[in-house]
Image (cartoon, coloured by chain):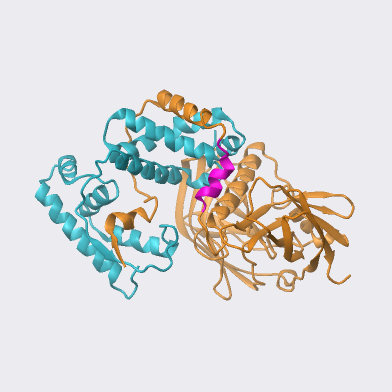
Chain colours: A cyan, B orange
Amino acid sequence: MLDVFALKAIQNRDEDALARLIEKYAAYVGTIVRNILRNPEEDVEEVVADVFAALWHNANRPSALKLKSYLGGIARNKAKNKLRERLDALPLEEDYIVTADSGVEDGVLQEDERQKVITAILALKEPDREIFLRHYYDLQHVAAIAAALAMSESAVKKRLIRGREKLKTILEQGGNQL
Amino acid sequence: MKTKISDLLDRIEHYPRRLRQIDPIATEKVKELTMRKINTANSYEPQAGLRQTRAPRRAFAPILAAMLILAAVTTTALAATGVIWQGIFGTADEGINTAVEYDYVQNVAMDYVVSNGVGVRFESVMLDNSTLNFVVAYQVPEAIPLSDWINSDITITDESGIVLYGEGKGMLSTGGSIHVPITADGLTFKMSHIAENVQHTYPASQKLYVEITNIKFFEKAPTIAEEFNGHWSFEIDMADKFVDRTALSYRGGLVSGSEIVAVSYANLTHVSFDVEFELSEPHTIMKKIKLMDSNGQEYESKQIASDDGNAPYLVRTSFPVTLFKTTPTFTLYYGGSSIELIRSDS
């Protein structure tokens, strides 16, 4: 069943259509959730179910062309919320970027600003980009990243520092602060 | 202000990242959990959920653009699988088909522009205040057995540099399209693009500059049968009927009920009846919007955009009725309320 049909059917409260989308996207959503929560698997399954329940209640929101991306965003947010519930939110190697307050509504960047951040991320070379995204986007701790990429923790930390500096430079230079 | 990097990345919403490995999950268990969650939330009003999470914005909410895209693509797939191509633009939209019937359409005479072995040309175009429609024909070097639909990276700008079409590329673009592939021999395809946009007014453009950089033929979405990169570029001189187009203006009259406060504008164009009206309280999608002409003919709204975050609570919508079939008055219905629309020159 095409996504566009499935979404339309879900709007008409067709549970079979939701089941088809679960079959199609559950593994993808589960991978995103698992990257953030790591374990136990029961928690992962619970959050994945939350994602598809959210789709059920908001089936008129996503474009069929961007359904996968929409599910990915929901998955990440719900996984992060679950992480906070556990009170084991990871201490990150944090730093701050100077940003402007204007133009940001409800915590969502305007499209041009979003593109600027994505461009800055893309400007990082591998494996710095992978390390950076695992840490700040997937919220993985340094030890886990080091294990996954067969690197030492100190090497991961150094690359994170380098990534932060590059990101700050890209975002704060060029006369266009966020 | 200072922002944490992790918070900054939060705010880009979903980062389009290719996962290195997709791991399996207990799908049946997820289904069971999901069904349990949605069934225990029966009292939950789904549309209320939409309202709770929609961001208050000064501009009309972009989410509605996404809804328009969905609606349009829905029509696409229906048409594609049903193999029902109606009229020049492959749509059952009465407003568009009436406009075609009265020759409010331009047949584009051009040869295929070829890049990377693939030919592209426009066959028809229609431009109105809230609608930009065009039919694109594709010719491929080797037969593609079956195409579910075709997704082209098309950007259309006009002589003033205004981006009229191209998802995420300009203020006037909605990305909404109806795609109806037709193939007789596996070598030629035709797609209709219906870009409806009640949030802005398309300008009276004299020229369209078309740029295409990528064409994907989907065997069955998301499986791509063939993908072509190239540079297809051409310009179209727009017919005077589009450049000099006019509209009939209507004003608000007798109001019944308490929900409609006033009509900001009501313009009957060659393709649609575009209306903006103010509500006494935020718009909810549970309230049905329809139009009735003085002959009793009813029209369902095609597109709806609203800004329910801040007063005044405005709703923009359009209906598939054209100035070729006008009546002296119309009645706009919103929920249990209605307002009479009277031709301004009467």
**Is B50 included in the stretch rendered in magenta?**
yes
Residue drawn where x is 87% and y is 60% of the image = B327
Residue range (magenta): B44-54
Relative to the observer, which residue lies in front, B310 or B134?
A: B310
Relative to the observer, which residue lies in front, B207 or A28?
A: A28
Using the rendered image of the protein, determine whether residue B126 is visible from the camera's viewpoint. yes
Counting from the top left corner in percent of width and height, residue B246 is at: 77, 71
Counting from the top left corner in percent of width and height, residue B228 is at: 46, 51
Q: In which quadrant of the rendered image does the C terminus of chain B lie?
A: bottom right
Farthest residue toward the front? B258
Counting from the top left corner in percent of width and height, residue B162 is at: 56, 71
Is B338 placed left or right of A20 in the picture? right
Is B98 placed left or right of B91 in the picture? right
Q: Quadrant of residue B27?
A: top left
Residue drawn where x is 77% and y is 63% of the image = B270
Residue drawn where x is 70% and y is 44% of the image = B85
Counting from the top left corner in percent of width and height, residue B249 is at: 79, 68
Relative to the observer, which residue lies in front, B59 or B110?
A: B59
